[in-house]
Amino acid sequence: MAAPKRKKSKAKTAMRKAQWMRKLTVPGLSLCPECGQPKTPHRVCPHCGYYKDKEVVEVV
């Protein structure tokens, strides 16, 4: 079985253990240019159904 050649520093160990914290962050929100409601970037707006100035989904 492979063994590490050098000891991992405390900083590297802490950085590895803190990875779960980075995954918990909320993705940034942008405003829809059509309706002005907040939406996730690169997604269809759930309020008006527009994406890149085109109506993609008809919202009831």
Image (spheres, rainbow, N blue to C red):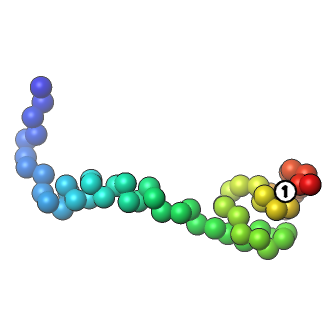
Looking at the image, can residue 40 be seen? yes
Looking at the image, can residue 50 be seen? no
Query: Picture quarter containing residue 28?
Result: bottom right
Q: Which residue is mark 1?
A: 49
Judge from the rendering whether residue 6 lies leftward or rightward of residue 13; answer left or right: left
Q: Quarter holding the C terminus?
A: bottom right
Question: Where does residue 26 sit, x and y in percent of width and height?
Answer: 53, 63
How many discs appear? 1
Under circle 1, the secondary element is: loop
Write the residue at 45% across / 58% down. Answer: 24
Judge from the rendering whether residue 32 lies leftward or rightward of residue 5; answer left or right: right
Q: Amino acid at mark 1?
A: Gly
Write the residue at 78% across / 58% down. Answer: 46
Q: Is residue 56 above or below residue 41?
A: above
Judge from the rendering whether residue 37 lies leftward or rightward of residue 9; answer left or right: right
Query: Picture quarter containing residue 4?
Result: top left
Q: Is residue 58 above or below residue 1?
A: below
Write the residue at 34% across / 55% down. Answer: 19
Circle 1: is it few (<14), some (14-19), or many (20+) Cα within 10 Å?
some
Write the residue at 89% across / 54% down. Answer: 59
